[in-house]
Image (cartoon, rainbow, N blue to C red):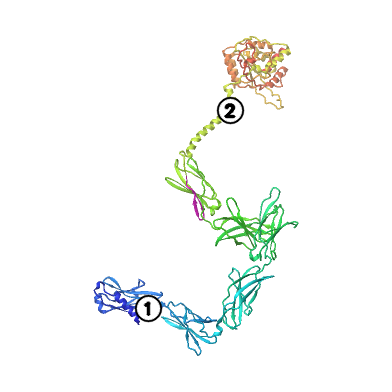
Amino acid sequence: MLTSQNIICAWTWVMISTFIIKGELRMLCHDVDSTSKVVQLQSTVSLSCALREECLQSLDANASHIFWRMNDTQIPREQYYFNATVSRVTLKTIDAIRTYLTCHINIKGAPNILHRFEIEAGLPPDKPKNISCISYWRENFTCSWDQGRENHLKTNFTLTRKLQGMKNEICPNLKKSSCSFEYPELDISGNYTIIVEAQNALGKASSDPLDLVVWHTWKTDPPWNVTAHSILGQSRSLLVTWRKPKMAPPKLPLYYSLQYQIFGTTKWIQIKEETISNTSFILKNLKPFTNYTVAVRCIGKDQIYWSHWSSMETGVTSEDKPLTGPSIWRTIKTLDSEGNREVHLQWKALNRSKANGIILGYRIWYEKRRDRTVIQQFNTTSLNSSLLLNHDAYIITVIAYNSAGDSPKGILKIPAVNQTDLPAVQDVRTTSQNNQLLVHWKTSRPSDNGYVIEWCLILTANPCAGPLHWQREPNTSKMTYLQGDLAKFKRYNVSVYAVYTDGPGNPFSMPVYLQQDIPEVGPIIDAPLVRGTECTIKWHEIPVEKRRGFITNYTIFYKYAKGEADVTVNSTVHEYTLKSLQKNTDYTFYVMASTEKGGVNSTLSSFTTNALGQEDIVVILVPVLIGFLLLVNVLIICFNNKHRIAKHIWPEVADPAGSSLADWFHGHQYKNDQTPKILHPGNDLYTSISTVEVFCLPEESKQQSVMKAMTSHEHTVEVQCSSTMPPTSNGEETKPLQPADTVEYTVLEEGYRSQIPDLSRSMSKQPLLSNTSEMSARDHETEISTLYKVEENWCPQNIDENDVFQQITETKTDSHTKTYLNNSLSMTESQIAFCLNSSSNPVIDSSCKEDVKVQGDIGTLNPNPQSSLQDNQPANPMQTYISVELLGFMLNNEM
């Protein structure tokens, strides 16, 4: 059924929204019928709109033209029920606390609102529960309750107090879930019945009656003037005092309770005793020299409620000896020239809970591990000290002291210089969690005395800048958070030590960041080096304090008018050569340094490639270099073979004046008092040439062959050796000569005359030159026979030395002789044939031995031919070859 309020609202909407468009019909044409607009959540709601029959024809529409919307969303037609005049919609579930529904009709193609429904959804009230009432002395009597679940509707509460023999009283000071009767409307001796009622649009509910004695409902004020004091000689106790509450029923016995906590914490510790009737209490088993916060409350005898806690007051316990010794660490420098090393000690100040008082100072002493004799002891108030120790092992002890006494010993062992290294920690890893650095490690051998983790800030100029931080962990630990404030984007060096009985092992160190970011600046680039179509780019590392993370790589970006490219290198590379660039082209480039968070670019730089590429330069330089190397090789070959080349171009001509023949002849002249006959002292320049060929012949024909050769015009003697050769000067046996081996000598008539000794000047001891052309013996003999037409292979039996020289001088020069002289200058050196020991003629044997001595002697041309010639001698003497042995043989026969 519709309420009167709903009917009024419906007619109002109808009057506003149901006039026909264009003013053709101005009469009410519909009715509405709906349930209450306040409904229960999750319930079903049905609404209807009806058209009047007298309007159907004028509207030219019926109920089928009506449609519904919920919060501007059209409801599906499947939820409609309609006939000719009525359209009804049913909503199965209402989930919203407040919902709007409208019904519309299309009149002449235009939608018109017939009615608008507002639906409020909620729940009926729950029964109030847990009613409690408290009496405050000379203030009020207050009751509170639990109203139950939220019903989303406006709910009214009523509290009724019933007293026997008295009329019911309704609480005037109503609040959401409590109500108070103000003083003096109290009866401290009566018994009350309390009932609470709740009501909203969907219903009402009443609580169960609460019967209570007003006397038991008293709640006093808390104690006041609470204090806490330390007790002399009792470092673990506090004396707490207070005064009774001001507002409490007279003659009501009170009991007290205490609670305390360490200052700055949130956990309270409560004293369980409830029979404290005095106004003081001693708290025991506390920590020395520690601030505690205390509070006190009270309750009356036979009462239900404790008073509120008093204000919180703070007190501190008295001092006690320090609980632990200082945590010590060290930095050891290398030995100096005197064999000492500086050990810088550091220790941490004890925190308040371990110091048990105010630390007045520290006592330090050290001793050698072998004799345990205290070397030095001193006091200090600082947290560091430096010692100068030698290479031995030491034990260093530090204690802290306050007014109550000394702390336990803090001991640090300094290993000897030559001590064997102890095992190091392995596989250290770090992770960042909740702005803290978590360090993990593993060890191959468990530590005896725990682990030490140290860290310090890394800067470019200092690998361990700022203070050195460290912390100790037990030997069962394998990970820990660094207990310190690490800055973001800063590099730290973290080292983990395993501490053994003999001291700490070797550290495992690694650089870490708590958090990384992109670098603060980009790399600094040097001037690029351009070589042809290549360019070498160099850059400097970013300072450590500006990297803000680990550099992962560098990327070079370069571009020119027609394109761009990039190349990436790892973080260890600080130089790269760009190759295969365009010739004579302008390039711009920059280098980006990257971390895991991103990269920063350097300043923009540029370079221009050369017009000639490296390949062009190679094409030009390689032929030039090859030509230069060939020229150098030719010059070196020529220099190394300069003598051989000189022989072919400028053959050497022997100087007869320096021959040993002259010296020999000079000695033989005075020995035999004989002087050879020299004919034609002023002969022409070109003279006849005599060739002497020496063969080793049989004894019966040797002398005949020699004499025959000397008397002939050809002047040729051949000596042929057929037996084995005598031993050489060093005892080795010389290879025998073949019968075809011959020795040829050419005798220059005028040149030989220059070898006549001159008593007025010194004679050279140089042997006669044996340089000849490379002409063979057969060719030479053929040439001789052609020129002179003489017979070969004969030797004269007897000959006089003067006749020999006379025959030489009588030989006339002609054009053939001149030609032969020129040829003889280019002949190769002849082979000298040695006569063997089988010769029976001592003269021949002696001459053969003498020939061995002069074999291979070489003479040189005198650069000043005039110095070796007699007056009226020719300026250019010709080449002369002669056998010294043969000449000696002939002279000896004469003698």
626 within the magenta span: no
Q: Name the spot of residue 830 as percent of width and height, x first.
A: 63, 21
Residue annotated with mark 2: 639
* The N terminus, quarter of image: bottom left
Residue annotated with mark 1: 37
Circle nearer the N terminus (2, 1): 1
Q: Name the spot of residue 149 as percent of width and height, x first.
A: 47, 78
Label 1: state its secondary structure: loop
Decide whether the magenta segment is chiefly helix, strand or loop: strand
Q: Amino acid at mark 1?
A: Lys
Q: Is residue 700 visible?
A: no
Q: Is residue 464 left or right of residue 142?
A: right
Residue 691, located in which quarter of the rendered image?
top right
Q: Is residue 455 visible?
A: yes
593 within the magenta span: yes
As displayed, is residue 738 above or below residue 873? below
Q: Name the spot of residue 204 as percent of width and height, x first.
A: 44, 83
Q: Residue at x 46, y 45 (%)?
A: 588
Q: Residue furthest bottom?
A: 165
Most foreground residue, 605 or 632: 605
As displayed, is residue 477 above or below residue 391? below
Q: Which residues are magenta?
A: 591-605
